[in-house]
Amino acid sequence: MARPRVTEGLSREEAARRLGVYGANAVAQERRTPVWRRVLQQLRDPLIVVLLVAAVLTLATGDLPDAAVILLVITVNTAVGVVQEVRAERAVAALSALSAPAARVVRDGAECSVPAADVVPGDLVLLGEGDIVPADGTVLDAALLLVDESALTGESVPVEKTAGGDGALGTVSAGTVVVRGHGHVQVTGTGAHSALGRIAALMGTAPGLTPLQRRLARFGRVLAAVTVALCAVVLALGLARGQPVELMVVAAISLAVAAVPESLPAVVTLALALGARRMADRHAIVRRLPAVETLGSVTVLATDKTGTLTEGRMAAEKLWTPHGEATVTGTGYAPEGHVTRDGRTVTATDAPDLAALLCAATLCNDAALEPPPDDGTPWRAMGDPTEAALLTAGARLGLDRGALEAELPRVAEIPFDSARKRMTTVHRTPGGGMRIVCKGAPEAVLRPTVLIDTPDLLSQAATRAEELARGGYRVLAVATRDHGGTRPQGPDTWETGLSLLGLVGILDPPRDTSRTTVAACERAGITPVLITGDHPLTARAVAARSGIVARADEVTTGERIRQGTAGELTALRVYARTTPEQKLDIVQAWRTAGQVVAMTGDGVNDGPALRRADIGVAMGQRGTEVARQAADLVLADDNLATVVAAVEEGRRVYANVRRFLLYALSGGTAEILVMLLGPFFGMPLPLLPAQILWINLLTHGLPGVALGAEPVAPGVMRHPPRPPEESVLGAGLWPRILAMGAFVGGVTLVTGVWALETGRPWQSLMFLVLGATQLGVALGSRARPGSLANPFLLVAVATALALQVAGVYLPPLRALLGTEPLPPTDLVIACALSGLGHVVMWAQRRLTGTSSPAAGVTCVRRVPRRRPGRVRHVGRGGR
């Protein structure tokens, strides 16, 4: 009788908890925020609160047109924010996609297939090659059972499982893959009690605010308070001069609207969207839009090893025989490549010792290489990747496996056993004799009981094997013996009296781009660190090859972290044998030290750390669905160099936000100065409320949004990242805003005084000059002046200037704005004065030595490599 579903009779939440990985998406569905709550969250922004108060007061005074404009701005900004949040929401995990859709179990003495979610503790599960393990369990029976656990542990090499084995050797975990053999497993843990379920629990924390969101929130609160205070001053001064209460209330409200850069959400959204599109063109897919800017803030890049710094495959790279050494070159499992010795390429004919070594390694082998179909995909390894690497090395020397097996067919074997650590095969020779081939770990083969070679040769081989192991290689020793008879004696005699052919050094080779990528990170002021579940020796070797550390640098392990003997985590650069929980601890330690952390990974074990990091980066090709769903950024090409390109885009986004703030806040400052100081020069109300709103609409509209599309400034990746806690207006931006605001306000006031003294329509002239000069500042704010890199800005400025002039000459707009037409000479004077905004912005850049109008960051001096977590501010510099 079939068992009932494990979730029957349970609530949805409890069922999801029980099923763990299978119910992760159900929990995510339950946690989705209602739309009304999202709208309220948007309306709580300090800048929006100022606009809401202004709208209410405007309605109270009966100024319906101005109220409509303010409410339209609030509606558009809120809608943009809500849509962005909905698009950015992702499930906490997609572990169900990783799980086997069905499992073969024995129930009531009969074999049956059930959904993987229905597997319960006590079930007997049948595993075969290619199966995904549906639950944690104990191995009861195994025949050459080899399981790929890289998604959980980060280990490059599959692990052999045996019945009754100690610890991990006798157990399997949910989500791992059987690459060879078959076995019977009794289920001990499912859902939340499985390895995947425990990882799912670690991923329950929602991501926090990005650095830009935190900076803008602080900025919004400060700006809101300053704006309200200044508007109160303007209102009080007007009332003291005897101005009508209603007029001054409307003027104060209009000034508040003018001081608030309400286009900021649109500018940020456009900059992020354009950054996401550019990243997609460079093979980086953005899953959470604010993450685009976060990349520009990254100070620490924590990278996984397998498939990220390395190619994610095994390669036989070093060959040693008693006659000399050789190196195997080439990428992937394709036979294309060479074997070189003493700087020249050799073949099987040129190097009979290497031919004998790789011939034996090819014969004593159960793997296979699958050639690609016609779709351009690479060669694939079938079976143990280590054995596939031996086949590839033999092919690159020119050996034909098919011909070898035809000439020396296998007639018997002793399979690999984790206790013996070696494998032996017997082959019939053309002369009717037998050849025994044995390969295995050096400590299992380089023994006097196995080999008949001299003690000096065994010592020499053992020394070289140890050197290769310290270099991060997995070393195999290969030996052989020929028998003249038709069959040697019993298997207990097969592994004696052999002659050593040589050693093979195998590793997961670093990517060709890993060293250049790490160097690019160093130049950009980003500290790279390696976090892996692999062996410490392997981790150190890969880190040294990639340029992360020197070979003498210390490598800590998960065991030392667990025992509390690892010391300060941010003082290290390589972390080996780490668990998912320890990866979380490492990432959090860097974040607690004030760093902005980007974490790359591809396995299930990387999921929690990807979610905890400020920016999670997953591999798109070889990465698990868990890693992709937990990440903010997915690399479609699995190339770490793409992260550097994404960092450049992130810095461009942040520079454009600062560029807009410099432009918008300097204009708001100018408007406030004009309204505050104008009465002291004989102008009771320098600008009407409608005129302020019109200027604000034109300058903060299309030109402001267009600034968000500015290209990246030259040399942006030759500077360190900005300090994580630096204000969005920090690094000298506030003084520049005040200086530009004072200049624009001064030009406007001088123009008004001159017009007042000469009997010209001074208010209309001030209205035109104030708006046009701000547009000149927009042109001077370009990242690449004199180029056509952003034609949208040129069109936006021209359109806004035309509308500003229309406000003085078109009768319907004159009636709305209260302006008067100007003589042609005054129009020419106003347009000429507007060019001063561009000139002064250019001069300011030259005087401050900044590379872009929004530049000016606090440089961060890189600390010694042994203690990269400490940061000191040492001065100012341009970005």
Image (cartoon, rainbow, N blue to C red):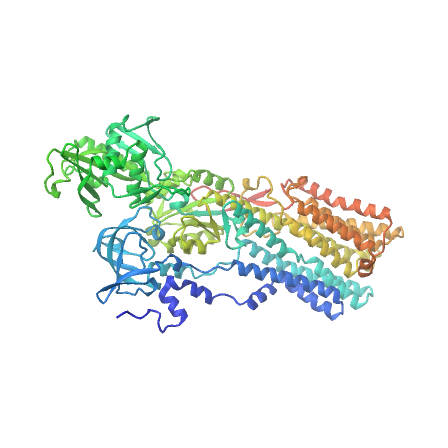
61 or 724, which is in the foreground? 61
The answer to whether residue 315 is seen in the rendering is: yes
The answer to whether residue 572 is seen in the rendering is: no
Which residue is rendered at x = 28% and y = 43% of the image? 367
Relative to residue 277, is residue 623 drawn left or right?
left
Which residue is rendered at x = 65% and y = 63% of the image? 74
Q: Going by the picture, which residue comes out furthest to the bottom?
A: 9
Residue 701 position within the rendered picture, expressed as x and y whole percent measured from the top left:
69, 54
Count all numbered tags in the image, as a single digit: 0
Relative to residue 486, is residue 423 drawn left or right?
right
Residue 690 position within the rendered picture, expressed as x and y whole percent measured from the top left:
77, 60
Q: Going by the picture, which residue comes out furthest to the right?
A: 759
- Which quarter of the figure is the C terminus placed in? top right
Kindly indicate the quadrant of the structure image that contains residue 190.
bottom left
Kindly indicate the quadrant of the structure image that contains residue 332.
top left
Compared with residue 518, is residue 818 higher up or lower down, i.e. above or below?
Answer: below
Compared with residue 562, is residue 69 higher up or lower down, i.e. above or below?
Answer: below
- Which quarter of the figure is the N terminus placed in? bottom left
Which residue is rendered at x = 68% and y = 58% of the image? 260
Compared with residue 138, is residue 533 higher up or lower down, i.e. above or below?
Answer: above
Q: Going by the picture, which residue comes out furthest to the front?
A: 374
Kindly indicate the quadrant of the structure image that contains residue 27.
bottom left
Residue 648 position within the rendered picture, expressed as x and y whole percent measured from the top left:
54, 44
Residue 487 position within the rendered picture, expressed as x and y whole percent measured from the top left:
11, 38
Relative to residue 322, is residue 760 drawn left or right?
right
Relative to residue 369, is residue 845 drawn left or right?
right
